[in-house]
Image: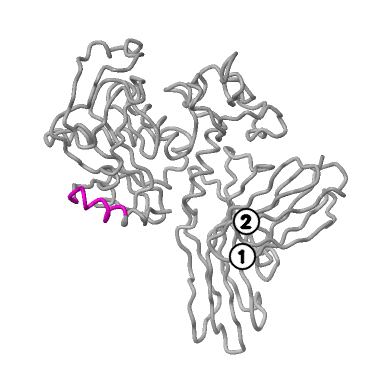
Amino acid sequence: MKHYLLYLLCFLNTIYINAQVFDVETIKLSGDNDKRINLVVLSEGYQNGELSKFITDATGFSNAMFTQSPFKEYANYFNVYAIKVPSNESGTDHPDTASDEGNYTGANDVPVLTADTYFNTSFDTSGIHRILYTYSSSIVYNVLANNFPEYDQPIILVNTSIYGGAGGSYATASTGSSANEIAIHELGHSLFNLKDEYLLQDVYYAEAINMTQETNTSLVKWKNWIGENGINIYPYGSSGVPATWYKPQIGNKCKMEKLDEPFCSVCKEGIIEKIHSLVSPIDSYLPVSSSVEASTYPIDFQLNLIKPIPNTLKSSWTLNASNFVNDVDDISIIESDLNTGTNELTVVIHDDSPFLKVDNHETTHVYSINWIITKSALGIDEITSEQNDFNITLFPNPSNSILNLKVESKNTVNLKVDIISLDGKRLKSIRISNYENNEVDISRLSQGVYLANFYSNNALLTSKRFVKN
């Protein structure tokens, strides 16, 4: 999750740029940096005497972000820090070179300006006035490497009242009208890979979470949302390239099209999916792997989860391949629960948020802890544990003949997958290995709906529906 290669980048950059250390202020602290998404806000165009204003601006952005869905529900997954980087002059460059300069209120009232700022930001980037950005990436990443290398997403706040911003490897936003909304919108691009949903220049169209050329309602990536909350397949334009690209929402009903609107259902789901790919909901657990000479009963097992607000995490505890209990954070095991010899206790956690429609969704995120408990006549000889995160993918769905199955896990795993009919009959059982694409021939199955059940250590991780055409 973290940017360890940044240390190498920092070393290379020191040939050209002297390492500088700046004050770092905590805006929002939810937990350890290695177990949270760390947003790092950088000041641009703030002189030394204006850095208190920068902290006010950064705090305002953070507060605004976590009052909006789905960030308010997943606020516990984020830390926010601010790095006070002073500039020699206030503001940013305003070269007055973009052809659309007169389309923005206030832009014509600002004279041509060159400001001596730390990150060299400028309006009129790529010939568009509102694109406020910097290509001085080595300077940005040098500051991060020397001041907060555990960052996940940098955001540059530019001290100007003129409307502007951009998404990219780092997000940028001005601090005037709609400042917080700009920053949140641009964060949608930079961290969550969302596309704009307004009419774009041809070069910006590409497949993404909320942009596609697929028009088949059974194949489009947001198929599970069609018919709900205004979601459908809408063209960007009526002619040319825009007419060949589609988005899930129209009528300025998504923040990726219009500021001050909420994110649409498809974008919310994409944001949460990215959160789950970056951070496990398992903050800590007990016991961790340990050898013990003996143990008194009961033996306590505990989870400390990073819970959404309200909590939508579900847990399933399995002992020796039999369901033990569901949706609790703490359990106790007594002597009669265990067999002499090796026992296997597994807890599987997934998010059952209404913002997610994981049924038939291509990728599912699942998390687990597996304990091996060795019991002898003298008591408990040993308890070992292993935590794992799984990204489980099934595609295409529907399928005529071949179903592709893939698991990605931080540990070496081999999963068992059972293909089950809706009346409960097991029709096929296969093994899949970590990071390998596994093709399953389903051509002989009758048309209809089936389940693919994924098991690890005899515990059910997830059950995914698929359609055989």
Q: Are marks 2 and 1 in contact (CB under 8 Å)?
A: yes
Name the residue at 70% across, 48% down.
464
Picture coordinates of residue 83 (x, y %)? Answer: 24, 43
Q: Is residue 318 above or below residue 449?
A: below
In the figure, is residue 23 to the left or right of 382?
left
**Please, what is the three-letter code of the amino acid marked with disc 2?**
Val
Name the residue at 16% across, 38% down.
86
Image quadrant where residue 342 sits: bottom right
Q: Which residue is mark 1?
A: 413
Mark 1: give few (<14), some (14-19) or many (20+) Cα within 10 Å.
some
**Please, what is the three-letter code of the amino acid marked with disc 1?**
Val
Residue range corresponding to the magenta coloring? 9-19
Residue 92 included in the magenta stretch of the image: no
Q: Which residue is mark 2?
A: 407
Report the Cα–Cα distance between label 2 and label 1: 9 Å
Image quadrant where residue 173 sits: top left
Picture coordinates of residue 249 (x, y %)? Answer: 57, 23
Image quadrant where residue 115 sits: top left
**In the rendering, which numbered label is found on residue 393?**
none
Tell me the SS state at disc 1. loop
Q: Is residue 233 above or below residue 329?
A: above
Picture coordinates of residue 178 (x, y %)? Answer: 34, 23
Mark 2: give few (<14), some (14-19) or many (20+) Cα within 10 Å.
many
- Residue farthest toward the bottom in the current orientation of the protein: 378
N-terminal label among 2 and 1:
2
- Residue farthest toward the front in the current orientation of the protein: 15
Residue 12 included in the magenta stretch of the image: yes
Tell me the SS state at disc 2. strand
Q: In which quadrant is the C terminus drawn?
A: top right
